Amino acid sequence: MARHHIFEIAFAKVYPMYVQKAERKGRTKEEVDQIIRWLTGYDQAGLDRQIEQGTDFQTFFAQAPAIHPHSALIKGVVCGIRVEEIDDPLMQKIRHLDKLIDELAKGKAMDKILR
């Protein structure tokens, strides 16, 4: 299995970009956090701790308390690739998160995003 560079990037480096993307479209940091918590099972303290520790994406998802069972319902295209067709489980989780943040930034209602 190929190692992707993004696996080793600190989640804390990408997190502010998720927030900025959402805020540019009138959404909030709290909504971004809600999406991340829904997907990963982290509580807010756990999410904050992962950010403070500079955990990489691989560790961030490996330590996630519980990936939401409905994450399999996340479908669509991110970076020209259909998320439901990604073979690597870690890359798929990262792209699921990207897709949810995209949906938030596009104005989709939270109840629709959180399936």
Image (cartoon, grey):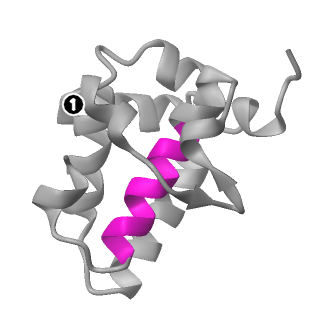
Residue at 27% in and 64% down: 29
Other-residue count near label 1 (Cα within 10 Å), few / some / many at <14 / 14–19 / ≥20:
few
| Highlighted magenta segment, given as a residue range | 94-105
Q: Is residue 90 visible?
A: yes
Q: Would you identify the image quadrant in which residue 57 lies? A: top right
Q: Is residue 31 above or below residue 87?
A: below
Q: Is residue 9 above or below residue 75?
A: above
> The residue tagged with tag 1: helix, strand or loop?
helix
User: Residue 22 placed where, x, y %?
Assistant: 37, 74
User: Residue 20 placed where, x, y %?
Assistant: 45, 74
Q: Nearer the viewer, residue 108 or 36?
A: 108
Q: Magenta stretch: residue 44 in it?
A: no
Amino acid beneath label 1 = Ala
Left or right for 96, reference 109: right
Q: Nearer the viewer, residue 8 or 109?
A: 109
Location of the N terminus (image quadrant): top right
Left or right for 28, reference 98: left
Residue at 11% in and 57% down: 111
Left or right for 40, reference 53: left
Kindly report the secondary structure that dominates the magenta region of the rendered protein: helix
Q: Would you identify the image quadrant in which residue 86 lies? A: top right
Q: Magenta stretch: residue 96 in it?
A: yes
Residue at 47% in and 56% down: 99
User: Residue 47 placed where, x, y %?
Assistant: 32, 34
Q: Would you identify the image quadrant in which residue 63 lies? A: top left
Residue at 60% in and 22% down: 89
Residue picked out by circle 1 = 45
Q: Is residue 49 above or below residue 84?
A: above
User: Residue 64 placed where, x, y %?
Assistant: 38, 18
